[in-house]
Image: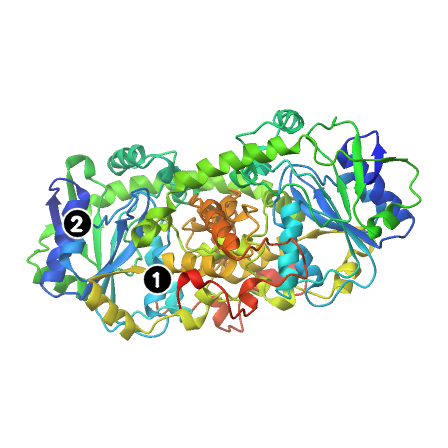
Amino acid sequence: MKALKMSKPPDDAIRDILRFSLEKKKVQAVFSLSKIEGNGYAYALISNKELLSNICPTFPLMPVNSAKMISRLTAVEAVKSPIAVVLRPCELRALFELVKLEQAKLDNLLFISFVCNGVFPIKAMKDGLDGKLEKYWENARIGQDFAELRESCRICESFVPDNADIVLMTGGSQNNDTSSVLMKTQKGEEFIEGINDQFVEEDRELKGLDNVRNRRAELKKTVFSDLKTEDFGIQGLARIFGRCINCHACSKACPICHCNLCHFEAAESESDPSTFEVDLNNRGALRLPTNTVFYHVGRLIHVTISCVGCGMCSDVCPTDIPVATVFTKIAERVQNSFSYVPGRNVEEKIPILTFERDELEELGE
Amino acid sequence: MMGKVIPLKENLNTTIKEILELLLEKECFDAVLVPVRVPSGESFAYLLMKDRRILQSCTPLPPIMPVQGARALRDLTRRGNSNLKVLCVMRPCEIRASIELAKLRQIRLENVSFLSFDCPGALRTKDYINSPEESDNQYQEIIATWESENFRSACNTCLHFSYEGLPADLHIHLTNMKEERMGITPLSDKGKESLSRIGIECNGDLSGWQTEVNEISRKRIANRDKAFSELRDKISGAEGFHDFFSDCINCHNCMRVCPICYCRQCFFDSSGEAKSEAEDYLAKIGAKGGIRFPGDMMLFHLGRMSHMALSCVSCGACEDGCPMEVPVSRAFAFVADEVQKMFDYVPGRNEEEPIPVQTYQEDELHQYEDAKGTG
């Protein structure tokens, strides 16, 4: 595979590539995580190459899942002239799911991604990452777990991007002062054509990463079994989601939940006073607001087939419910039963959007 | 203020529970809306209950306010008056928010009564979830001393913690808890009637208890003056405001936990606002060279402020619900205070009093015309 060897850290390498592409007018704008005024980080769409110094694509924070942002940019209409988008593998997978759900369009987007070493919980943006970044990159280099990262990242096995046009190697056996930029598609090659750097033949793409994947798979097993979804039922659901305050932050942060108005916020999910009266007579007591646990069941049904395990839901929960752990565990089973991998292939249909006459026979008629 | 002083039996919650039980037994009310500990034990949820046996599990005065009670009552009555006579056991700020929502036609108050209590404040929900037992002990002490550094910031500066100007039906006085007793007074005819029906005679004079309330008020006013003057410098101007909210990730959760923000779909979440044509975004970049995604962070907070500051009861739910722990409620309480003073309006005081933005006055706010030199 063709690769570009750049003797600089990944963020600098990406900045160089993007500067080159803006200068050569290969793209009209670039989209990347960026440092903003104050001490915050946010995604930004940038057309002025002077502002590229603020971007920090591999900085280990995910304030929002950027698939949601690309959906905002392209849902109404496809982009007309090229934009380079830098995002993490789970964000790219979520974006592919959104395309299948007709919430985004890929035309004229060029994707740059990287081997993802995980992100810190969003709260770290406030508390600061001073002193932690060095350890983060060192652990990434030697393939060690880092307990301070999002749990979703610590158990993620899909950290190598499948569908990006350009992929940067980070961590693994990589020295952090040099970057290998792999061109995975013809589009990627054309994009980089003309850049003044050294090209080499690269075949070490996955070296050192199998260990990381195996270690994460082991941790995932433990995390999933600690959750004890076996005794889910209504008791188990009440145990896990009982402290939910119905804020629906998990749905708003979820890249897959794309409804403008969630069913559970719509008028149709409200009850008349007479319904409350009947329910109260039957049960003796009613929780208000209603549908606290049911909302999560509804969301599980709607999103697990496409869930990419990004962990945004847990990060935004004001009552620290392990939403992402529940969702990724159930998602794994749902996705396995349809042999479906969300975000693998944009042409592949989401199973619930297709009809198969012969399937799921094990579930009975 | 005539009422009855009741010595505590076991503890405060059991004493209140007994009164609630009697109120149901004597059919003063058909059902009670009251907090109950959730099955896993580390939080509380509102339960509407009819069955007196289930009432045994309630915690009328929980240390936290995970869901603002007005949101629970809204769910029950958004589509019409309750057929059942319901007694809501709530903190003063929850009752006041309910009154505002009634004005905004999101709650219907017919058949609804309120039992309030002197509220020492609420602990931060996440702190409680992380150590429920320790927090429970801490709260016992707080009820006795009325002092804590672990309250929501909104509670430390709250002046509406007692019954004055509160449209409740029954009120429980808690400012003499050191002596293991509480007081109960009716605040309405309905309240008076239900107390007499359960055999509580209001022949004690509780006016003396006002001394403690005044004492606490003085401390709170001092806290408030200090907090607001610090904030004034910090949040002024576009830059100060921007820095104050710089950790905001635009999740809009402050709005969703806010009892006053009731729109099914916020303007800032509507498809027209959130999703534009790509070319529009590119045009927005313009001379700036770059735009933030998602955008409109400041506009969202300013928009929300202009919509709800008049009705803001400063309950602190916004801050409690913020995943980034942005001190949202401090900014909102500060602005609400200024705006409400401007219109001499106190949210939740009286259902009949219209919200100033819903009324038209030909002669008002001349001072702002003068300030601009256009008067």
Contact (CB < 8 A) between labels 1 and 2? no
Q: Nearer the viewer, residue A259 or B148?
A: A259
| Secondary element at image label 1 | loop
The mark total stands at 2
Q: Which label number is shown at residue A99?
A: none
Crowding at dot 1, Cα within 10 Å, few <14 / some 14-19 / many 20+, comes out as many
Res B252 visible = no
| Residue marked by disc 2 | B16
Q: Amino acid at mark 1?
A: Thr
Please state the horizontal and vertical placement of residue B271, each as a whole percent of the image: 62, 67
Please state the horizontal and vertical placement of residue A250, each as a whole percent of the image: 49, 52
| Image point (30%, 46%), residue name | B119
Quadrant position of residue A126: top right
| Secondary element at image label 2 | helix
Quadrant position of residue A59: top right
Crowding at dot 2, Cα within 10 Å, few <14 / some 14-19 / many 20+, comes out as many
Q: Quadrant of the C terminus of chain B?
A: bottom right
Q: Using residue B178 as the reference point, say whether residue A47 is left or right of it.
A: right
* Residue reaching furthest to the left: B199
Residue A152 against residue A264 in the figure, above or below: above
| Image point (72%, 39%), residue name | A56
| Image point (42%, 45%), residue name | A321
| Image point (70%, 35%), residue name | A206
Q: Amino acid at mark 2?
A: Ile
Subunit under mark 2? B
Please state the horizontal and vertical placement of residue A4, each as a whole percent of the image: 85, 37
Res B287 visible = yes
Q: Which label number is shown at residue A290?
A: 1
Residue A216 against residue B305 in the figure, above or below: above
Q: Nearer the viewer, residue A284 or B112?
A: A284
Q: How far apart, in angstroms, are the residues tagged by discs 1 and 2?
A: 25 Å
Subunit under mark 1? A
